Image (cartoon, rainbow, N blue to C red):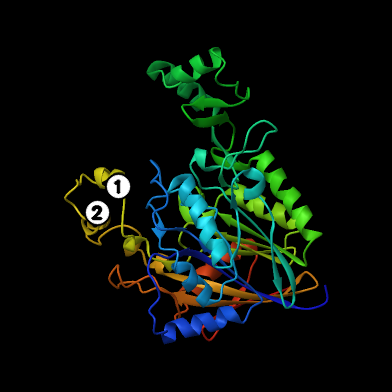
Amino acid sequence: MNNAMTFVATGDSFITRRLPAERTERFAGISGLIRRAHFRFTNLEVTAHRFEGTPSALSGGTWAVAPPEVLQDIADYGFNAVAWANNHTLDYLYDGLEATAKYLDQYGFVHAGVGRNLAEASEVKYIETAAGRVALIAATSTFHDFWAAGEQRPDLAGRPGVNPLRYHANHIVSAERLELLKQIADTVHINAQQKLSKKEGFATGAETDVFMFGKHRFMAGEREGLATTPHEGDMRRMLVRIAEAKRQADYVLVSIHAHEMEADAKDKPADFLKTFARACIDGGAHAVIGHGPHIVRGIEIYKNRPIFYSLGNFIFQNDTVTHLPADFYEKYGLGHTDTISDALDKRSGNETRGLGTDPKVWSSIVPFWTMEDGELKELALYPIEMGFGQSRYSRGWPALTPDTGVLQTLQMLSAPFGTRIEIAGHIGKVIIS
């Protein structure tokens, strides 16, 4: 591993519209940056098909679907690798998953994190570049339970789905409060069905030091709060894949889609994500690329390798889906005579609430970094904006910007990790010690 390799990555590409046929200066600037790198990554946060799937009873928030031709637009930006394990992967159930995989193959993408069973979903994917071979592994911690891919058995096929990173969330309270919680549980019978399921053999026993209040885990402890840890089996599976990949490629990158946060701070990752990311680096990964909360989170340089806890958005067009199922309309008290515009108006309170009104959602960064002999040599951060304040059918396309506000935010969020960022002109530079 003697040659330098360059990498570029973005957060979520929630794309539901086609790029204009006439390429704009906005497109040219950011595409030029992306195409300078050997490895060029984005997270695809839509299913791509011609409604070849059935809308799920549960979605990632919006039933995310776009025509497969948007994959050509993703390719035109310059990306050559995508992850698509996220909270929208099964918005259109298994047929939507299968169709999206088909179109990703047709458009020539290396794509990771989803498969017809757990082995395929967790599979390492490789991309050949002029500077060497890169391995990509992708997972998500944000998903509905039935979206997790299932293992094969000798006598039964596995289940299609995402490569899951589950976690334990333990609510720590004093012994006195835990006793009160147990009394409340007995009074309101919140655990009645759970007790019956154990008695009849449909549920297994819980740990002796954990009290289940409904679906939530409580433990007694001196330091009250929420403690999260990665699922041991999922963590072990990821480390096995990393160990495999580092013997088969020059560089190993891990993608993780995660909405989970520290307490109520959306811009800070949950503890289990920090544990997971550092374990991936310890296991041989050269970078961890996070995305999911639709805003940026801090950057950690761990053992001279970058961890991006969230790169925010790259393309964000969740308000221009063309169809939504009846479930969405019913949620907002709408019926069959209402239209998609009515539904989107109702959700946003006529653009007075929601993600469309949060400026942090519409500014982000694109990191461009160089590694040599497995070591980080340079990391530059390019701020982008996506049209905050524009109409919902116009905003969502990325463009490089001279506004350094997001870099200043990133300085603050990265400082607790010991990461120093200098702003030179309109570009951020991570200080490599």
Instruction: Answer above or below: position of 119 versus 316.
Output: above
Taking the spot 53% from the left edge, 31% from the top edge, the residue there is: 217
Give residue 427's position: percent from left, percent from top.
55, 81
The residue that mark 2 highlights is 343
- Going from N to C along the chain, the mark reached first, 2 or 1, is 1
Question: Which structural element holds mark 1?
Answer: helix
Q: Which mark is residue 257?
A: none
Q: Measure how far apart labels 2 and 1 are at the Cα level.
A: 8 Å
Residue 27 visible at all: yes
Q: Quarter-wise, where is residue 56 in the image?
A: top left
Taking the spot 41% from the left edge, 63% from the top edge, the residue there is: 67
Q: Which mark is residue 328?
A: 1
Q: Is residue 248 left or right of residue 142?
A: right
Give residue 275's position: percent from left, percent from top.
66, 50
Amino acid marked by disc 2:
Ala
Instruction: Answer above or below: position of 220 versus 121.
Output: above
